[in-house]
Image (tube, grey):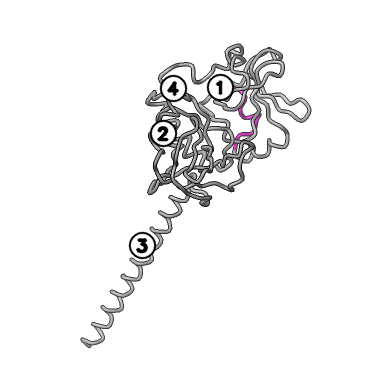
């Protein structure tokens, strides 16, 4: 009887231990998945930073030139100084979807200092020295960087200490002054119209003068899948980011869902 009782206790103890091991493994896998989120793409190389070239690029000691992916500079002078302080003489790991160089021969990458779980891009964003670009296709990476930008905006850090970072959609002249530049614009969508293969989000009533956002027909399904069908944005306040063009008034073309943030109700 005693032996049977001991065997039962031993069996229960073993089962409890097995359950604990399973839970521990599951927790480890979950943690790894969490760390793998964001901008932790495949490694595309590593090296030691020899010099900073400008506000968003640097040279490794083997001669390779790297461009920081996923951000646009808001304050080039301060960003260059901050980048030098962060990187020069430090070992870094480069991550990205591929290591194909840009047209200037630089390797675009998300840059991680040794032991860091978030990229250097996040540090510049939190300091208010950069803006999240419109080129990020990965939604988890975009969310990570947007959160860093929002932190700086709320704290009024760096360039966010001023009131001119975000342009008012009701001031088309101010937006046009930044033609050819990466710009963030906020305003209420007054109407949504389609002309041929292009959908227009109009922020004013004068279509030849006021600010508008354009979406190509081939991109619309991606917005619909994300719950951002163009027509649903009518009378909503939104924030958009991209490169300003002049086409009978200032325009920003939307190529990715991450270029739009819905700011509130009607």
Q: Is residue 110 left or right of residue 253?
A: left
Distance, label 1 to label 3, CA atoms, is 46 Å
Residue 210 lies, in percent from the top left, at 65, 14
Q: Quadrant of residue 233?
A: top right
Q: Are marks 2 and 1 in contact (CB under 8 Å)?
A: no
Distance, label 3 to label 2, CA atoms, is 41 Å
Category of crowding for the residue at label 4, using alpha-carbon neighbours closer than 10 angstroms: few (below 14), some (14–19), many (at least 20): some
Residue 24, numbered circle: 3
**Of the residues tagged 1 and 3, which is closer to the observer?**
1
User: In this figure, which residue is indicated by the disc labeled 1?
Assistant: 185
Q: Could you tell me which secondary element the residue under label 2 belongs to? A: helix
Residue 235 shown in magenta: yes
Q: Are marks 3 and 2 in contact (CB under 8 Å)?
A: no
**Of the residues tagged 2 and 4, which is closer to the observer?**
2
Q: Quadrant of residue 246?
A: top right
Q: Which sits in the foreground, 74 or 258?
A: 74
Distance, label 2 to label 4, CA atoms, is 18 Å
User: In this figure, which residue is indicated by the disc labeled 4?
Assistant: 159
User: In this figure, which residue is indicated by the disc labeled 2?
Assistant: 84
Residue under the point 64% across and 37% down: 103
Residue 224 lies, in percent from the top left, at 64, 37
Category of crowding for the residue at label 2, using alpha-carbon neighbours closer than 10 angstroms: few (below 14), some (14–19), many (at least 20): many
Category of crowding for the residue at label 1, using alpha-carbon neighbours closer than 10 angstroms: few (below 14), some (14–19), many (at least 20): many
Extreme front residue here?
62
């Amino acid at each position: 009887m005693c032996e049977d009782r001991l065997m039962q206790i031993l069996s229960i103890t073993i089962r409890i231990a097995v359950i604990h091991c399973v839970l521990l493994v599951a927790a480890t896998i979950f943690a790894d998945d969490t760390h793998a989120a964001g901008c932790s793409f495949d490694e595309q190389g590593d090296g030691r930073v020899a010099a900073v070239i400008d506000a968003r690029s640097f040279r490794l000691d083997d001669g390779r030139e790297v461009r920081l992916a996923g951000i646009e500079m808001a304050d080039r002078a301060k960003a260059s100084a901050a980048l030098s302080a962060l990187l020069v003489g430090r070992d870094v790991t480069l991550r990205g979807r591929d290591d194909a160089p840009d047209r200037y021969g630089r390797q675009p990458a998300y840059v991680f200092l040794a032991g860091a779980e978030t990229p250097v891009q996040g540090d510049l964003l939190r300091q208010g020295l950069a803006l999240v670009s419109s080129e990020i296709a990965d939604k988890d990476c975009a969310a990570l960087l947007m959160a860093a930008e929002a932190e700086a905006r709320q704290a009024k850090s760096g360039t966010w200490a001023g009131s001119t970072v975000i342009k008012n959609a009701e001031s088309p002249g101010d937006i046009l002054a930044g033609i050819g530049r990466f710009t963030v614009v906020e305003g209420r969508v007054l109407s949504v119209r389609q002309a041929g293969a292009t959908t227009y989000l109009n922020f004013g009533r004068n279509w030849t003068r006021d600010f508008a956002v354009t979406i190509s027909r081939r991109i619309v399904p991606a917005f619909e899948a994300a719950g951002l069908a163009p027509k649903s944005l009518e009378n909503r306040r939104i924030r958009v980011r991209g490169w300003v063009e002049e086409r009978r008034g200032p325009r920003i073309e939307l190529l990715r869902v991450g270029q739009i943030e819905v700011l509130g109700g009607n």
